[in-house]
Image (cartoon, grey):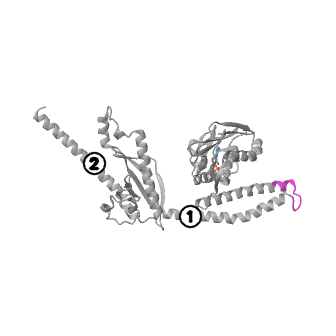
Amino acid sequence: MNETQYQIENKERISGIRERAERLDLLAAQYRAVLAAVAEGVILADDSGGVLLANRAARRILRLGFDGCESIVGQPLTALFAVCSPQSQAELSQAVTSIAAADRHSANHSGHKGAQDPGPGAALKSKQADCADPAELSDKATALLLTDGERALQASLTPMQDQQNGFGGTVIVLRDVTTEQQIAQAKNDFVSLVSHELRTPMTSIKGYTDLLLKGAVGALNEQQKNFMTIVKSNVDRMAELVSDLLEVSRLEAGRVQLAHEQLDLASIVYEISQELAETLRQRELTLQFELAPRLPRVYADRGRVIQVLLNLLSNAYRYTPAGGSITVAAHASEDEVQVDVVDTGIGIPAAEQDTIFERFYRADHPVVRQQAGTGLGLPIARSLIEMHGGRLWLCSEENVGSTFSFTLPIYARDRARPGQDSLSTRIG
Ligand code: ADP
């Protein structure tokens, strides 16, 4: 290469670098403008909880003043969140530490792209990457509710991947949700008050209806009996709705206390099945069990576990046409027992599978319309399981059937001996 050629190439290289630098400057200015404009507080923390960046809204929400940008960078998160209660600060620090640890762990297992051999075509890819975002947000966010004694602050924590170095920090998006919380509280108080007020007159209507039907004040003719039976079935429906509403408002207000004890799930399942045997026979449904032998005991509230199982089983029989079958299966993993309630019923279309956990949702299906229901059973069941530290979810296919599954933590002393083989029994 002669001197002139060398100078031309050098010039091109320098102008390429300048162009890239200008593009990066422009990108950085755009990001800064967006960050300054958003109403949510945005904070970037490194893996040890040090602050790398905090936008204007974050400084406003955390009452830090607007000019402290330089002094904020490098400080620990706890200093930035000094306005929050000590418990909120501790929860936040712990969440940031565990997000960083989990992200590093998954990067080690998957082998981060920055650490790998670039391979063929790397030059082209790196050219394309010049224009791409230098960092990527994971789609796994952790939500926390923080408080400073008077306000409720919602923090959403998401790990960020840096294209070069792997874990690039945790992005914390902060929102003042005090007003939303107050509205939710007022709504909850109203529902709770109305349900309480309705309960007393309804108990009296129910009592007198039963007395009339039993002929306590004289025999009823056929037509009177029919009318009273209709009154009774509607009062029963209203009583169910009121008791579900009360339960929802208690759960939302955090007024439900769990009485944990060690429980043998298999015996609870068999007990409930005895109660349901007659209903299942009338509905021409069979019930089968696939419970692992020596299933470890779980640590849970007996009454609440029965409530959840009854809800899932009654849904299974109400939404499964005659001739179908219901299976209750249970197996243990390292620290939890999973229970599956499987039916061969009408199933739930994919588009509705999240919606059915919303309050009052009932599918628009003839079989569902035929059955009395409040649309509150599943949201209550999910909240109760989550209060135990478990999960409740479903797999379903329309016209094939549904499987509702939930997990409960294993009682600590039983953790070493999960059941292995499967024992099948059939009744019905
Ligand atoms: P409810 O059964 O009282 O309506 P739930 O909250 O228990 O209230 O259920 C909500 C809705 O989810 C039901 O109305 C029904 O549309 C659907 N669903 C629940 N379980 C099943 C099931 N096993 N099979 C089909 N649909 C179901």
Which range is magenta? 215-226
Q: Residue at x 28, y 48 (%)?
A: 24
* Residue 343 to residue 78: above or below: above
Q: Nearer the viewer, residue 244 or 105?
A: 105
Residue 123: percent from the left, percent from the top? 29, 35
Q: Secondary structure at mark 1?
A: helix
Residue most toward the left?
3
Q: Amino acid at mark 2?
A: Leu
Visible residue check, residue 413: yes
Left or right, 3 with respect to 69, comes to left
Which of 102/340 is in front?
102
Which image quarter: residue 223? bottom right
Some atom of ligand 1 lies within 8 Å of the CB belonging to the residue at label 1 = no
Q: Position of residue 93 (x, y in %)?
A: 43, 57
Q: Is residue 398 left or right of residue 99?
A: right
What x and y, as percent, mark residue 252?
A: 58, 59
**Which quadrant of the figure contains the N terminus?**
top left
The 10 Å Cα crowd at callout 2, few under 14, some 14 to 19, many 20 or more, is some
Residue 238 is situated, as x and y percent measured from the top left of the image, at 71, 58
Q: CA distance from mark 2 to mark 1?
A: 47 Å
Would residue 322 be counted in the magenta stretch? no
| Marking on residue 24 | 2
Task: Name the residue beneath numbered marker 1.
Answer: 185
- On the question of residue 176 being in view, the answer is no
Q: Are marks 2 and 1 in contact (CB under 8 Å)?
A: no
- State which tag comes first along the sequence, 2 or 1: 2
Q: Residue at x 56, y 47 (%)?
A: 354
Q: Amino acid at mark 1?
A: Gln
The residue drawn where x is 83% and y is 60% is: 211
Judging depth in this view, the residue of 366 and 317 nearest the camera is 317
